[in-house]
Amino acid sequence: MARMSERDGRLAVGIVGAGRVGPVIGAALAAAGHRVVSISAVSEASRDRAEALLPGVEIRDVPGVVASSELVVLAVPDDQLASLVAGLAALDAWQPGQIVLHTSPAFGIDVLEPALLRGAIPVALHPAMSFTGTSMDLSRLTECYIAVTAPGPVLPIGQALAVEMGGEPVVIPESARAAYAEAIATATTFSAAIVTQATQALAQTGVENPADVLAPLIRSTVDNALRNSGGLRTADVPPNFGSI
């Protein structure tokens, strides 16, 4: 087991995956005082992203990241998560007492069972936002809700990590995780498709900056739709919600 960080409550954090999500989560945890000790990154683009958001953090292979960490963040595509967790279990990589956190909206903690069986602590956290993979996402984290799924005794750990990332935790039971994932996918896919279609249509009229023209309309429309569908307060809508 990796040694506990010298500062009380601070964890040695390892990030598996240097796509748009992993380095941002790492940077948010580092800003909260945790120590990001390693990250896995394969492509040149992912290495550049890791260096930009986590300068000086060691790039290691996945087993090396797991071995060095008290908190392992699995920020990989949904279709890779289950095989990754099981493969690391087959290598006997998971350590008793180690927190294993994934960021996929599609899964709760069941996917982490191979790690749980080896004594790891499972947590699923999903920030309900679209990531760019840049420092811009750090401020957006402070405006978003973070879905938390964890066993009852572990739930306070997940909620605390969500708060430390800058977001507002919302508990999603394991039984509701599929419905949550469907809601996220519907909102994300629908919004992107409609915005793209409208922007292209407006561009055909000769408008030079169609995204700038549509942005206020989209924000106000989404604001009104959310308020009408769930009694949303104006203060609940982030200033950049629906930004293009």
Image: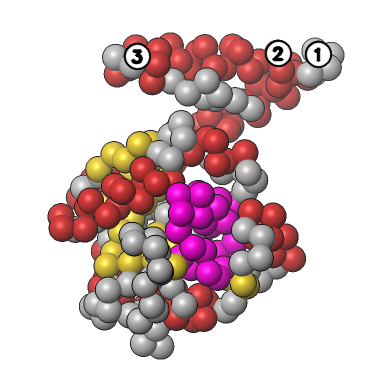
Sort mark 3 into few (<14), some (14-19) or many (20+) by Cα contacts within 10 Å.
few
Q: 206 or 126: which is nearer to us?
A: 126
- Magenta span: 13-39
Task: Give the image location of residue 172, x and y in percent.
Answer: 25, 44
Label 3 sits on a secondary structure element that is: loop
Q: What is the x, y in percent for residue 138?
A: 55, 41
Q: Secondary structure at mark 2?
A: helix
Can you identify the residue that label 2 sits on?
A: 213
Q: Residue at x 47, y 77 (%)?
A: 68
Q: Amino acid at mark 3?
A: Arg
Whether residue 208 can be seen here: yes
Which is nearer the eye, 190 or 153?
A: 153
Q: CA distance from mark 3 to mark 1?
A: 33 Å
Q: Which mark is residue 207?
A: 1
**Cα distance between the residues tagged 1 and 2:** 8 Å
Quarter of the figure with the N terminus: bottom left
Residue type at tag 1? Val
Residue 219 placed where, x, y %?
Answer: 54, 17
Q: Name the residue rendered at 40%, 46% in the picture.
A: 164
Left/right placement of residue 175 relative to residue 87 reads left
Q: Which residue is mark 3?
A: 233
Label 1: element kind: loop
Q: Are marks 1 and 2 in contact (CB under 8 Å)?
A: yes
Question: Label 2 crowding class (10 Å Cα cut-off): few <14, some 14-19, many 20+?
Answer: few
User: CB under 8 Å between callouts 3 and 2?
Assistant: no
Give the Cα separation between the discs numbered 3 and 2. 25 Å
In the figure, 69 relative to 102: above or below?
Answer: below
User: Which numbered disc flags the more N-terminal residue, 3 or 1?
Assistant: 1
Instruction: Please state which of residues 243 and 175 is positioned toward the viewer in this rendering.
Output: 243
